[in-house]
Amino acid sequence: MNKFYPFLLALVIAFAGCQKSKPKAAKVITDACSLITNDEVQKVQESPVKDAKSSEASDGRFRIGQCFYTTETFNKSVSLAITQRDTASEKAVDPETFWHETFAKYVGHAPEKEGDEEKKKSLRENDEEGRQLPKKIEGIGEDAFWSANRVGGALYVLKNNVFIRISIGGPETEEVRIEKTKALAAKALSRL
């Protein structure tokens, strides 16, 4: 029996080491409205929430939950979406992989290498269509970008292999919108 003790001990240590190396998986969120409370939306948007409607869908790759917070002053309403891996599908994709494929080309807004033709093409297309490129945002989640459009914009934040999208209405400047969406994102991320 003494011959097998060192082997058994090495096996137990190796197995324990494997357990520690697993990445932390985010808990599955089934109700997007559970990520931000009505009171938190009211505090940031300075308008009471009249209704919060939740919905969920799957495209086979991702499970996407959404919540729309309708505020008393309608143009201050808030939209929240959470994108998670669809664990029930064989075609599921990790949101973090999709995130890096989507946003990597915008870091620094210039191709890293001479041969990075796909990145160059995407940046040219955005420039030709007059669209603003996503802006890297620091200080929230593992990675974050602000994507502006004609009527406002949205903050995208990655954490624990899920990402959220928050957009808000209101007459504020882009800088104020970014700060408000960051405040709401912090609340949502604390519940992942």
Image (cartoon, grey):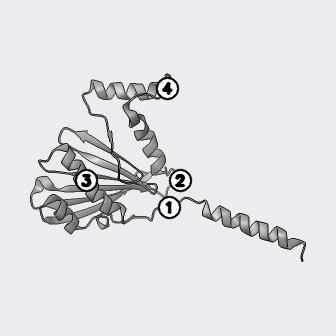
Left or right, 75 with respect to 109, comes to left
Per the image, the residue denoted by label 1 is 25
Q: Residues within 10 Å of mark 3 (few under 14, many from 20)?
A: many
- C-alpha span from label 1 to label 2: 18 Å
Select label 1 or label 2 by which is in front: 1
Left or right, 48 with respect to 148, comes to left
Per the image, the residue denoted by label 4 is 113
Residue type of the residue flagged with mark 3: Thr
Identity of the residue drawn at 37% across and 31% down: 109
Label 4 secondary element? loop
- C-alpha span from label 4 to label 3: 33 Å
Q: Nearest the camera: 191 or 50?
A: 191
> Which of marks 4 and 1 precedes in the sequence?
1
Residue type of the residue flagged with mark 2: Glu
- C-alpha span from label 1 to label 3: 24 Å
Please tell me in which quadrant of the rendered image residue 56 appears. bottom left
Residue type of the residue flagged with mark 4: Lys
Kindly identify which numbered label has been placed on residue 90: 2
Residue 36 appearing in the image: yes
Residue type of the residue flagged with mark 1: Ala
